[in-house]
Amino acid sequence: MTRALAPIAALLLSVALLLMGNGLQGTLLPVRAQLELFSTLDIGILGSSYFLGFAAGCYLGAYVVRRAGHIRTFTAMVSLASAVALAHALLLHPLLWWLFRALTGFCFAVLYMVIESWLNEKSTNENRGLVFSIYTIINLTVVTIGQMMLTLGSPTAFPLFAVASILVSLAAVPVALTKAPAPAPIATVHIRVRHLYKLSPVGFVGALAVGLANGSFWSLAPVFAQSKLLAVGTAGIALFMSLAVIAGAAGQWPLGRVSDRMDRRKVIVIVCVGAALAGISMGAFGAKWDVAIFVFSFLFGLFAFPLYSLSAAHMNDSVETGGFVEASSGLLLLYAAGAIVGPLFASVAMRLSGPEGLFFYTSAVHVLMAMFAVYRMRRRARPSEEEREPFVDSIRVAQTVATIDPLAKPGDDGISDQRPSSPAS
């Protein structure tokens, strides 16, 4: 294992610092926005802006990397993301925060692209699974630590914004000083949206549903927790968010292994129903008992977060040889599309029915997804065992090893037939 990690140790250290800062910022901003009396819709647009910028980064990132190179692109995006993190504390206006979040989303899309293309090139067929498993573990661990850093100070004060900025800034140091050569230029891939839907309607709609539901959770769940956990304060908000992440990680492996042994669509129905019940319970009973909020947060993460991995695995079961990168990039684009509009719908639901509206909305998304999966099971048989691909654990949606190019032609991506690592917040 040491031999596999030695060439990428500096990169993994940068990843840890980068995502720790982003984890803190992602929870801090909705809390501070509510304290600044931003409307629920304003806060929802913050989440939409981030994913809009993220989608733009997926389209344009490869051109930035080709122009400046991996290391200079990484340091430039880190510098911009760090500056924007501080700007939130200095300029407290919804319009400016929307712009800042879009810039942050763009920066992180490009950063993920650099990171994962680097990891992909420095790993081999024999150790790629180990490398990306460690990458995912680091991701989950440091995001949780970042969320818990909310307890270190007041959301209304400057220090927490400074901490987020410092962590992001420090991420540039290991990469800037590394002696490892930069990887080859990032490839582009053409996305045939209609083709992907025909291959796997459930995988296609599942990725969109994850964006609609989970994008709303990341954007607005801190607001829900803040309104329900007044007596507990920021510690309760941080714990609420962290429990969902931990549960999502815990659910990946068992649900994935079960899906390898049966029709994945049945498992998708199960997790959608479970997430819907957890969301309804959160909205209906969470306000009556503080402990219940934490229990339902854990259950929501346990069922809702593995849905992307299950949808991706089901899509890969139907993808032809050489089409894995297109499928992975297409699912990422669908997730981003859902995450752009999802927080807007959720914020309207919260305005109409209070903070509980967030989880009533996510429950509606999961119920509709379950119904669609049941409908598709009656229309098409499951893929044969020979066609099925092994499940790959994943919680963060950010697979950007290949960037999306709407002008590229099918087959000119120059990418090998090997499937990239599967793509969570």
Image (cartoon, rainbow, N blue to C red):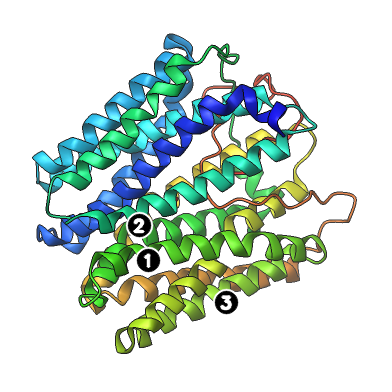
Q: Amino acid at mark 1?
A: Leu
Q: Are marks 1 and 2 in contact (CB under 8 Å)?
A: yes
Mark nearer the N terminus (3 vs 2): 2
Residue 172, picture quadrant: top left
Q: Is residue 151 visible?
A: yes
Under circle 3, the secondary element is helix
Q: Alpha-carbon distance for marks 1 and 2?
A: 7 Å
Q: Quadrant of the N terminus?
A: top right
Q: Which mark is residue 273?
A: 3
> Is 10 on the left or on the right of 224, as rendered?
right
**How far, Cα to Cα, is label 1 from label 3?**
24 Å
Query: Dot 2: what SS?
Result: helix
Q: Is residue 304 left or right of residue 226?
A: right
Q: Residue at x 40, y 83 (%)?
A: 292
Residue denoted by label 1 = 239
- Which mark's residue is nearer the viewer, 3 or 2? 2
Q: Position of residue 291 (x, y in %)?
A: 38, 82
User: Distance from label 3 to label 2 (Cα)?
Assistant: 29 Å
Q: Residues within 10 Å of mark 2 (few under 14, many from 20)?
A: many
Label 1 environment density (alpha carbons within 10 Å; few <14, some 14–19, many ≥20): some
Q: Secondary structure at mark 1?
A: helix
Q: Residues within 10 Å of mark 3 (few under 14, many from 20)?
A: many
Q: Residue at x 66, y 58 (%)?
A: 310
Assess whether mark 2 and mark 3 are in contact (beta carbons under 8 angstroms): no
Mark 3 belongs to which amino acid? Val
Q: Name the side, left or right, on which 51 lies relative to 34.
A: right
Residue 324 spot, x, y in % from top left = 70, 37
Which residue in the protein does label 2 denote? 148
